[in-house]
């Protein structure tokens, strides 16, 4: 495969941006390869600057539930841009999008639009602290909630591959207000609440962990979190930046039937543009300025172009009754390809899948906790990744990320992927 131009561009980028990228995982360090510089994408295909075409399972890390360059979304973006790209004043589009979110997401009584998932989480946590008058928060090891100081504690995603338990530059005092429990381990949560319960403002969780690879909640785990937080007057926040609109129109809270007090949304809500949101109970959201004393603002918040992209995407989701069944079916096809290849070549691996989110882990499994995730053989992952890329299948360059399916993945694309999975596993040591 010719990667001459990507290699050249990456070498130029290295002198211009830290690690040559604007977000760490893009640098391909975990797989020791050169990242592909992307020229364009359409449907389920992504094209690099050397003219290679790949079937894309990164999907911009989640937003592309309908694939790339969806005509309705592109039209909406162009139409909005022609009317002006930013006003710093209220628009009707914001009303429409907020109403759409309130209609779709069970916990949403009020919404605030922001620019990134990081900002959504940071702001939701601040609102929860303002509402409760408490300082402590609880998160789970391996769950990633963006890069704000207080949440870079035992975080997932790029931080797992970089092997940095927390980030340099985060004052100890910030991290001290963040307590960490083990995902899917009730006892670890009970212990924390027994000791600190009355001082815990919020518990934040990815309802399906997707930043340590995909790890589903054990049956009853989310219900348990709902119960214990209610008992202690702690705000339960579902970080649905990945799961929101992906598992169901109302996200994981609809999928699992557990309603949190607040939720953070990102990725799909912006239709591929930089936008995110936090939402929740009216009494909590009313603490946010200018209604209440919790300050949060943004020059580009509710940006009309991003709002138009988000609205077009959510509208398409609402109108498409068969969407989640189709995604489930496509997910099943790939899951079967993985389990068949694991059996055929006797590879110590397992597959976790929830709807259109999945990860293969190179350990026998089951993978239910962060401790299980850590057992995964990263050398094996590297070989698997290289083989898939060679067969034009573009997946995340890290064991600790999800594979994102879209509605644009055709039967033909899935068939090619199934063959690539088989070939990749045939080369691995069983
Ligand atoms: N929360 C979750 C669950 C995420 O997966 C991410 C990013 O991947 C974030 C928050 C941060 O979002 P952003 O990268 O838009 O700041």
Image (cartoon, rainbow, N blue to C red):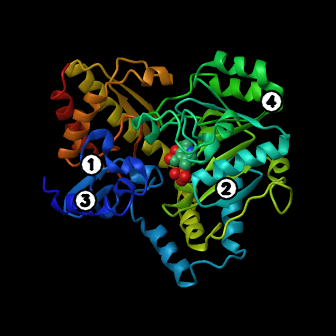
Residue at the image position 21 percent from the left and 49 percent from the top = 392
Q: Which residue is mark 2?
A: 101
Q: Earlier in the sequence, mark 3 or mark 4?
A: 3
Q: Earlier in the sequence, mark 1 or mark 3?
A: 3
Label of residue 230 in the image: 4
Residue at the image position 58 percent from the left and 83 percent from the top = 84
Total number of numbered labels?
4
Q: Which residue is mark 1?
A: 413
- Separation of marks 4 and 1 at Cα, in angstroms: 45 Å
In this rendering, the label closer to the viewer, 2 or 4: 4
Residue 336 image point, x, y percent: 32, 30
Residue 422 is at least partly visible in this image: yes
Q: Earlier in the sequence, mark 2 or mark 4?
A: 2
Q: Which residue is mark 3?
A: 11
Secondary structure, mark 2, is: helix
Q: Residues within 10 Å of mark 2 (few under 14, many from 20)?
A: many
Secondary structure, mark 3, is: helix
Q: Is residue 301 above or below residue 395?
A: below
Residue 243 is at least partly visible in this image: no
- Separation of marks 1 and 2 at Cα, in angstroms: 32 Å
Residue at the image position 76 percent from the left and 25 percent from the top = 227
């Amino acid at each position: 495969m010719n990667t001459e131009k990507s290699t050249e561009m990456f070498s130029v980028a290295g002198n211009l941006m830290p690690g040559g990228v604007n977000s760490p995982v893009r640098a391909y360090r975990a797989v020791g390869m050169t990242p592909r510089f992307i020229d364009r994408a359409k449907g389920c295909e992504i094209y690099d600057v050397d003219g290679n075409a790949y079937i894309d399972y990164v999907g911009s890390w989640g937003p592309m539930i309908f694939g790339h360059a969806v005509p309705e979304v592109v039209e909406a973006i162009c139409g909005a841009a022609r009317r002006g790209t930013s006003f710093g004043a209220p628009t009707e589009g914001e009303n429409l999008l907020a109403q759409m979110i309130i209609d779709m997401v069970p916990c949403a009584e009020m919404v605030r639009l922001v620019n990134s998932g990081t900002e959504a989480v940071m702001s939701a946590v601040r609102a929860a602290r303002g509402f409760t008058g408490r300082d402590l928060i609880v998160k789970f090891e391996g769950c990633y909630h963006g890069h704000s100081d207080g949440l870079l504690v035992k975080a997932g995603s790029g931080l797992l591959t970089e092997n940095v338990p927390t980030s340099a530059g985060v004052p100890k005092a910030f991290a001290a207000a963040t307590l960490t429990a083990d995902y899917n381990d009730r006892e670890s949560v009970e212990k924390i609440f027994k000791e600190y319960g009355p001082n815990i403002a919020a518990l934040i969780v990815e309802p399906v962990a997707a930043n340590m690879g995909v790890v589903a909640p054990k049956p009853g785990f989310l219900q348990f979190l709902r119960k214990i937080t209610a008992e202690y007057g702690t705000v339960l926040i579902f970080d649905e930046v990945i799961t929101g609109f992906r598992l169901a129109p109302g996200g994981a809270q609809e999928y699992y039937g557990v309603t949190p007090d607040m939720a953070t949304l990102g990725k799909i809500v912006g239709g591929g543009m930089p936008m995110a949101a936090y939402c929740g109970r009216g009494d909590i959201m009313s603490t946010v300025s200018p209604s209440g004393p919790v300050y949060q603002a943004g020059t580009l918040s509710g940006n009309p172009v991003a709002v138009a992209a988000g609205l077009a995407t959510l509208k398409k989701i609402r109108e498409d009754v068969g969407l989640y069944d189709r995604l489930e079916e496509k997910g099943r096809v790939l899951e079967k390809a993985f389990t068949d290849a694991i059996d055929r070549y006797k590879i110590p691996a397992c597959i976790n899948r929830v709807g259109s989110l999945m990860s293969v882990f190179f350990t026998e499994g089951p993978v239910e906790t962060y401790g299980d995730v850590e057992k995964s053989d990263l050398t094996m992952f590297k070989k698997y990744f290289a083989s898939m890329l060679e067969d034009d299948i573009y997946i995340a360059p890290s064991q600790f990320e999800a594979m994102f399916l879209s509605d644009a993945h055709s039967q033909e694309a899935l068939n090619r992927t199934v063959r690539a999975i088989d070939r990749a596993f045939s080369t691995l040591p069983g």
